[in-house]
Image (tube, grey):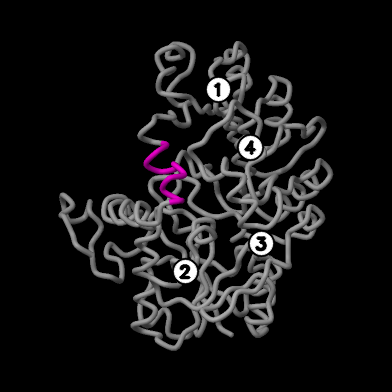
Amino acid sequence: MNCCVVIPTTKSNYEQGFSAPLAWLFSGYENRVRGIYSVDLTPTAIGPFDTFIIELNWFTTLHEFGKIVSFIREHQPRAVILFGGLFAQIHYRRIFQEYEVDYFIRGDNELPIKLFLEGCKPSSIPNIVGRDFENPIDYRFSAAEFERLEYSLDWFPDYGKYPRYRDSMTFPLPMLLTSKGGCCCIHSGCQYCLGSQTGVLESAYGREPVAMGQPTLMGQLSTLSARFRVFSLYVLTPFSYDFAGQFFNATAMIEIDSPVSLTQARETMSAFRRCRLMLPLYEEGVMGKTIRADLDELLALEDEEHRLTFFLYDRDISAVAARLPESNRSASLTPIWTSRFFDFSYYSDFEKARSFSREIFYRFPFQLRGGPTTPPWGTAFPWRQGRPRDRDS
């Protein structure tokens, strides 16, 4: 098998553009897997490959997904195409109907991907779905497997071409998640994002979310800091982790959505040589109503190597304008911002997702560093050709 993993680039201006498992799923298979961004697809580039894996994680990439499949089928008609991602978990049956794809992995994909890449017959692999079969979810990720994850980006030498923001510290791979299979954060509650739909995710994965414990997190951070200069940590669980006395010689982008005390914030920041820590502005967590009383004390923790940013609602910008510089505002949670890029209704409604993904495909494509100005399907990037025109395809 010679496998090409294709990464869409229509990321809807959402800076967390990569699904975290990309950093560990292909570790150990660098000799048979190569990553490529969709805009770098050419007949020559895909010529050596007989198998393709296409990411369909965010609903915003659905239109681009169709373009990728069509391009591969035109130039490699006999290739095997496997697709996967959170959006695909919800609509994989519809995707089989709409696109010329061959296989999909339900639920957790660590073991199925391993078996697939080792050449096992797909119909014998747990969790795999084909056009004429659907295997049950017999493999489920467990907490013990967090310790065995091995991270590698060697299979994706062009990874660094993806543009990032705020001095390249926003959600780089590898990304360490403290929960797999759903959000376990404590806050006042949200309904707009897929992570809040625990029933949907439990049905997709065949299990409840799996959380990472203290010893495993510290061990994984030690491993990552020894191998990677930059990585990210996304805390999707209650913040019960103790960073006191720890030190990791690396740059980390850290997001914590649950409530965090001043002491916890201080200890977390000081545990890394350099970091940007994203915190909720609210006592209740990322979704809340009560602005933190210790905002000034938190900002005083900053120095040249340790920076803070906060999530806040647009309604509260004026209330904190004098105390919170713009450079410390990560994002404002406006109804338009959340609904157009995160609202679960876009995940649950296939046609709604397809329509919106088509719109942003032509309005917000990212140009890779050093990449082409025209994707393989021939439509130049909007800012290279002037005002976007209405299109039918």
Q: CA distance from mark 3 to mark 4?
A: 33 Å
Circle nearer the N terminus (4, 2): 2
Q: Position of residue 100 (x, y in %)?
A: 41, 77
Lateral position of residue 306 relative to residue 159, left or right: right
Residue occupying image coordinates x 54% and y 81%: 132
Q: Badges 3 and 4: C-beta atoms under 8 Å apart?
A: no
Q: Which residue is mark 1?
A: 288
Lateral position of residue 169 relative to residue 371, left or right: right
Type of residue at label 1? Gly
Q: Which residue is mark 3?
A: 108
Circle nearer the N terminus (3, 4): 3
| The magenta stretch spans residue 188 | no
Circle nearer the N terminus (3, 2): 2
The residue positioned farthest toward the bottom in the image shown: 78
- Magenta residues? 338-348
Q: Which mark is residue 174?
A: none
Q: Which residue is mark 4?
A: 274
